[in-house]
Image (spheres, helix red, strand yellow):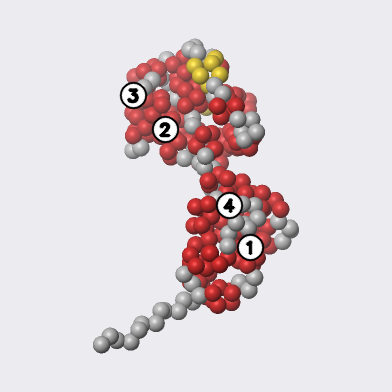
Amino acid sequence: MTGPTRRRTRLTDKETEERMLTAAVDMVGETGLTVSLEHLSFEDVIRRAGVARSAVYRRWPYKDLFFSDLLRELSKGAVPAEFGSETSVREVAEAVSARLYLLATPEGRHRLLSEVVRANRDFETVRHSTAWRSYLALHATFLSLEDGPLRDDVREALTAAEHGFVTRIADAHRQFARLLGYRIRPEVGAGFETLATLLNAALRGMLLMEPTIPGLSSERIEGRPFGAVASAEWSPSALALGAIEWTFLEPDPDVVWNEKRVAEARDALERIARGD
């Protein structure tokens, strides 16, 4: 004879809220986000969360109230793009690792820095990213919100996300510039954060244009830009980013290149390429 059926533990309103928002965020991560959020079914979220409908409707009498809270939750975890990620930095280091002998001369270091720009694959990575499309939709949704607490909350979260994102890009460029003995030109009057902001803006602009100008992703241009000695294939995005990079960067006259410095830079780039 079996014992009495064990009743399912009743969730608190807070647990119901957390499960619903987690389920909805997961669903957005799988399908991407649309500007209106209308592609999300409130009933599907309830089933996915495994919570009682009565508890959900007690917390959110109308689905629009839930979608407002979901918008806040999505904005907190917003990822503007994948530029300057650890993977991206490692891939760039791998691309230049076969040319580390160039570290010994000023001309060689110039070629290496150009290769850092040319080898960057952020444009292709982000172009196929669901997270990028969702971020665009989230940003468009924010722009359509009326003035009020919801718009203020989303703005604050997106501003924090952008700041963290630009900081990561700036850190990555500062790292490679330091290793290759470069600095921001003093006459520019700006720092790596400004450089990162402009690189970000240029790349996003091209990503927005690419669906109607497919050559931005498919075209390759043979040339020797930015004082390069050897001719190579450049993508339009690499040329655009390189123009910004070389406007900002110059060899650091305070860096003394000797055998020890060359060895240290080589070792550091190899460690980055290995992901150490």
State the residue position of label 2: 91
Residue 65, above or below 131 = below
Residue 259's quadrant in the figure?
top left
Q: Earlier in the sequence, mark 3 or mark 4?
A: 4
Binning the other alpha carbons within 10 Å of mark 1 as few (below 14), some (14 to 19) or many (20 upward) gives some
State the residue position of label 3: 263
Q: Is residue 145 left or right of residue 112?
A: right
Q: CA distance from mark 3 to mark 4?
A: 47 Å
Query: At numbered mark 4, what does the secondary structure look like: helix, strand or loop?
Result: loop
Query: At numbered mark 3, what does the secondary structure look like: helix, strand or loop?
Result: helix
Q: Nearer the viewer, mark 1 or mark 3?
A: 1
Residue 121 appears at what percent x and percent y?
49, 32
Q: CA distance from mark 1 to mark 3?
A: 55 Å
Tell me, yes or no, if residue 79 can be seen here: yes
Q: Earlier in the sequence, mark 1 or mark 4?
A: 4
State the residue position of label 4: 33
Q: Residue at x 49, y 62 (%)?
A: 23
Q: Nearer the viewer, mark 1 or mark 4?
A: 4
| Quadrant of the image containing the C terminus | top left
- The amino acid at mark 1 is Ser
Tell me, yes or no, if residue 113 can be seen here: no
Query: At numbered mark 2, what does the secondary structure look like: helix, strand or loop?
Result: helix
Binning the other alpha carbons within 10 Å of mark 3 as few (below 14), some (14 to 19) or many (20 upward) gives some
Q: Earlier in the sequence, mark 2 or mark 3?
A: 2
Q: Which mark is residue 15?
A: none
Residue 102 appears at what percent x and percent y?
40, 17
